[in-house]
Amino acid sequence: MVEIAEGCTLDSLPPMIRLVLQGRAAALDAAAGALGLDAVPPLLRAASGAGGQALRLGPFELMILPALGSRAGLDAALAALPHSLVDVSDRHVGFVLEGARAADILAGLCPLDFAPSSFPVGMVTRTLLDKAGAAIWRTGAQTFHIEVWRSFAPYVEAQLREVGRGISFSLLSV
Amino acid sequence: MLLIDCPYCGPRAEIEFAYGGEAHIVRPAADVSEAEWEAFLYLRDNTKGVLAERWRHSHGCGRFFNALRDTRTDRFLAFYEIGTPRPETGEAA
């Protein structure tokens, strides 16, 4: 747990399994069923089920964070349907940015509006953090899960710290 | 900076997108002449006015879509999905 600004922490997530599923509606429905979800989450939204979490990054794409041991059920549910299911665990590094200024720190690197009205809890999207592609998922009012490609991770972490330092400095009473 | 309205993700900054060139260019059948094939590969209209063009939301949902943009003013008139016909805007092409 590293504090990068006053009341705002940045943590690296431990290694975890990430799958990218590309397919038409039938394949996405089958995957949602295997994960224990009632339905495929709407575009740019995430949903959690007994079998794991599904992040709807595009109209024909889900990023799946399966619970331990649920990969077999997923494979079985999709076996008869045309789809592509790729394990990208090693490609990604996850961060959790948490605190009252978390949205402000992201806004320093990304042109998206992180106000709760336009980026509510449960929203997830791919975008750019400064120059690096990233998926940003709001898991709580003041908590963001950030997925970046492994080779970009030191760069993104340094940029987040830099913005955090700027915000801390601007808060100093002179 | 252009504000581009992805049909799937909503309005996003231009830096998230990749340009895909002119839209609605149909690939000819396999038995065309070399001149027709050359025209398919290389010849474009270089429109001054409303242009139908492809964009890809490369740092977002990853999908291609079409847009109508006035090349004189950079103003976007419409955004629509790949495979749907060019919408009527009432402006001269």
Image (spheres, rainbow, N blue to C red):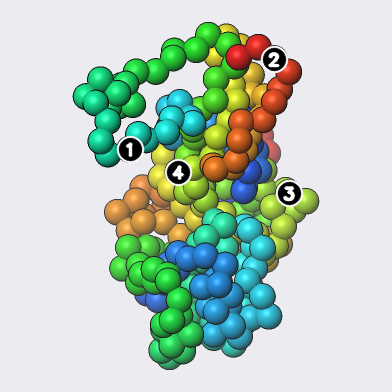
Q: Residue at x 41, y 45 (%)?
A: A132
Q: Give residue B29's mark.
A: 1
Q: How many marks?
A: 4
Q: Is residue A32 left or right of residue A174?
A: left
Q: Residue at x 73, y 49 (%)?
A: A118
Q: Label 3, secondary structure: give it.
A: loop
**Residues indicated by labels 1 and 4 sit on the same polypeptide chain:** yes
Q: Alpha carbon of mark 1 to alpha carbon of mark 3: how far?
A: 46 Å
Q: Residue at x 57, y 67 (%)?
A: A25
Residue B10 sits in which quadrant? top right
- Within 10 Å of disc 2 (Cα), the crowding (few <14, some 14-19, many 20+) is few
Judged from this view, the residue extending furthest toward the left is B34
Q: Alpha carbon of mark 2 to alpha carbon of mark 4: how far?
A: 29 Å
Q: Are the residues tagged 1 and 3 within 8 Å (C-beta)? A: no
Pinpoint the chain carrying mark 4.
B
The amino acid sitting under disc 1 is Ala
As rendered, which of B66 and A43 lies closer to the eye? B66
Pinpoint the chain carrying mark 3.
A
Which residue does the numbered mark 2 point to in the structure image?
B91
Q: Alpha carbon of mark 3 to alpha carbon of mark 2: how far?
A: 33 Å
Q: Nearer the viewer, mark 1 or mark 3?
A: 1
Marked residue nearer the N-terminal end (1 or 2):
1
Which residue does the numbered mark 4 point to in the structure image?
B58
The amino acid sitting under disc 4 is Ser
Q: Label 1, secondary structure: give it.
A: loop
- Is residue A42 positioned above or below A81 on the image? above
